[in-house]
Image (spheres, rainbow, N blue to C red):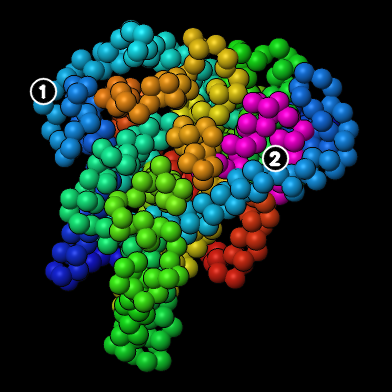
Amino acid sequence: MTARSPLAKIVVYALLAVLSVLFIMPLAWTISTSLKPADKTMVLPPEWWPHPIVWRNYLDAVTYRSKELGYIPMVRYARNTLYLAILSVSGTVISNALIAYGFARIRWRGRDALFALTLATMMVPFPVTMVAVFSVFRHLGWIGSFKPLWVPAWFGSAFNIFLLRQFFLTIPRDLSDAASIDGCTELQTFWHIILPLSKPALAVVGLFHFMYVWNDFLGPLIYLTDERMFTLSLGLQAYQSQHGGTEWHMLMAASLIVITPLIALFFFTQKTFIQGIALTGLKG
Amino acid sequence: MTLADRRQLKHGLAFVSPWFIGLGVFLLYPILASLYFSFCEYSVLQRPMWVGAGNYVDLAQDTVFWKSLTNTLLYAAFALPMGLIVSLSLALLLNTGVRGLAVFRTIMFLPALVPMVALAIVWLWLLNGQYGVVNNLLTRNQLYWLLYLGYALPVAAVVGLWLYDRLALTWGAARAWAAGLTSLAAGLVIIRLLHPESGPLAFALAERFRAIHQGPPGWLADPAWSKTALVVMSLWGGGNAMVIYLAGLQDVPAHLYDAAELDGANWLQKVRHVAFPAISPVILFNLVMGIIGSLQLFAVPYVISPTGAPDRSIYFLTMYLYDNAFTYLRMGYASAMAWILFIIIFGLTLLALRLSKRFVYYEGG
C-alpha cells in the first residue's frame, strides 16, 4: 500500500525519522558511555560526544585486573560460549534435519500421531520442565559441566523439526523417486538430494540456534557452577551484580563486546536472517 | 503389513530415533515427573516424599507467590497489547512503499539482536534515576506530558479508529472521522482531567500520576514504574514481531487492495478490511508467541534485580520458581509452581486459539 500524496509521504518519512532516532538512541548512548573516562560517565547534563575518547576501555573490560574493579575474563567467556555454540549448532542442524526427513519424506505407521504429539509439545516452556530435567542431569552427574547445555541439542527440538519438515515437504517427490530408482538408499537421498536443496532452511535453523546459545541465560545459570566456565551472558550478569551501579563505562564496553558479534553476524547474513524470521512467522 | 511397509517403518523410525530420546527425556518425562514432584517434598538431595496436595495448599497461602503471579499477569496484560500495537504500526508504516525500507527496517530490528543480559544492563544505565539519559531528556525539555500519553495514546487511538471504522459506512467518512477524532480527544481530555494538581479527578489518582509531577519517574527504582520500564524494554527489543508482520503485509496480493479501492476504500479501510484479515494468522502466531514469552519472563528482570526489587515489583513467577528450585532447594514446591504456570500458559493459548476462530481468516481454509 503505497503512500502517494505528497502530504502522506512527508508524514511517513517524518515518523520514520523520529522512530529511527528513538530506536538508535539507546545503542548510541551505550557506545558513547563505553568510550568515556570513568570520571566523565556520571556527568550532568549528559555529554553525547565522549571527550577524550578512551578506546582503552575495551581493552580494560577484557583484561583489567584490580581488587575494586575485578576483571571480566571476556576472552575465556567468549571461548566457552563459542565451544557451546559449535557443539549445539551442529547438533541442532544434524539432528533436526534427520528427524524432519523421517517425518516429511518417509511414510510409516504412527508417523502422523507422533508428529501431532511433537506439535503439542511446542507450547511447553522451559521453566515447566526445568526442575525435572535438572534432576535427570544430576543423576548423570553432569551438573557443573557443559554437557547439559549442548547434549540436548543433538536430540531434536519440536519447533525446528516442524520448520524443516515444512521445508522438506515442498521438495518435489519425483526427485526422491528418481534417486531411489537410481539405487540410492534413504540416507543417500537425504544426503545427496534433500540436504543440498535445503541449505537456506538449514542456515536459518543454525543461525537462530547460534543466537539462542549466545543469548541463553537461564540454562548456564542453572548448570554452570565454576566461574571459569561461564558463558558471555552469565559472565556479564555476574560482573554487573558485583560492580553494577558505578563502573558504567566498563559495563557498557563489556555489553558491547557481547552485542557486537551478533550485529556483525546479522549484517553478514541479513537476507537469511530476515527471511528466516518471516519464515518462522508465516509457516508457523 | 507388507514387506515394503515394514521397510518404510524401519527407515522412518531410524531417522526419527534421536527424537524419541529428545521427546522422552527432555519433554514427556520432565512434564510427568514435575507433576509427580509437585505432590512431593523434594530437595534433589533426597528422594521425593509424597505430601499430597500440600504444595498447592501452601502456594494458595503464599503471599510471595501471589505477588509474583500478579506481577506476571500485570506485565503480560500491558506488554502483549502494547507489543501488538507498536510492532504492527511499525510494520504498516514500513509497508507504505518508502525508499530505504531496508535501512529503516534494520534500524528498528537491530535492538532485537541485543542479548537479554546486555539489554537489561544497557537499560539500567539509560533509566538511571539520576544520571540516566532518558530522565535527563525528559526533564530538560519539559517532556513529562509525554509520560501521560504512554499507555493512553495507543489505547485511545485504537478506540478512536475502531469507532471510525464502525461509523464510516453508515455515516460517511467525514462524520466518522469526526467521531473517531472526538473519541481520541475525549480520551486525552480524560487523561488531562487526571492531572494531579489541576485535574478535577485528581483525588482518584494512582500513585504514578502524582509521581510524575514531583520529578521524573525513578523507573527501575520505583515500584510504580518498574513494570512500565520492562514494557518499554520489550517494545525496544520487539523487532522480531515487526519483521514477521512486515513479511505478512508484503505477501498481501495487490489486487485485493485494488478491488477495495474501486469500492472507494481509503487507506485506513484498506488496512482494516484487507490487510488485517489477510495477515490475521500472523497476528495469531505473534500473539501466541507473546503469551508464551511474556509469561516466562526471566533474564531481564533477574539481571536488574535477582530479588525483584524495588518492593518485589518485578519479581515474576519464573524468578520465584527459580529461587524455590535452586536457592531454597524446594523442588517439589517449584514443580507445583511450574505446573500452575503451564496451566496458565496452556489455558491462555487455548483461549487465543478459540477466540481466533472468529477473526482469523485462512486463505483456502
In this image, B5 relative to B307: left or right?
A: right
- Where residue A81 appears, as percent x and y from the top left, is 46, 18
**Magenta includes A72?**
no
The chain under label 1 reads: A
The residue shown at (58%, 36%) is B319
- Where residue B6 appears, as percent x and y from the top left, is 82, 32
Q: Amino acid at mark 1?
A: Pro
User: Is residue A170 visible in this depiction of the protein?
Assistant: no
**Magenta includes B318?**
yes
In this image, A218 relative to A64: left or right?
A: right
- Vertical arrangement, residue B99 with respect to residue B334, above or below: below
Residue at numbered disc 2 = B338
- Where residue A90 appears, as percent x and y from the top left, is 53, 21
Main secondary structure type of the part rendered in magenta? helix
For the residues carrying marks 2 and 1, which lies nearer the camera in this image? Answer: 1
How many numbered dots are placed on residues in this image?
2
Q: CA distance from mark 2 to mark 1?
A: 51 Å
CB atoms of marks 2 and 1 within 8 Å = no
Q: Which residues are magenta?
A: B314-343
Name the foreground residue: B275 vs B106: B106
User: Is residue A22 visible in this depiction of the protein?
Assistant: yes
The residue shown at (11%, 26%) is A51
Residue at numbered disc 1 = A52
The residue shown at (32%, 39%) is B128
- Where residue B190 appears, as percent x and y from the top left, is 37, 75
Secondary structure of residue under mark 2:
helix
Q: Amino acid at mark 2?
A: Ala
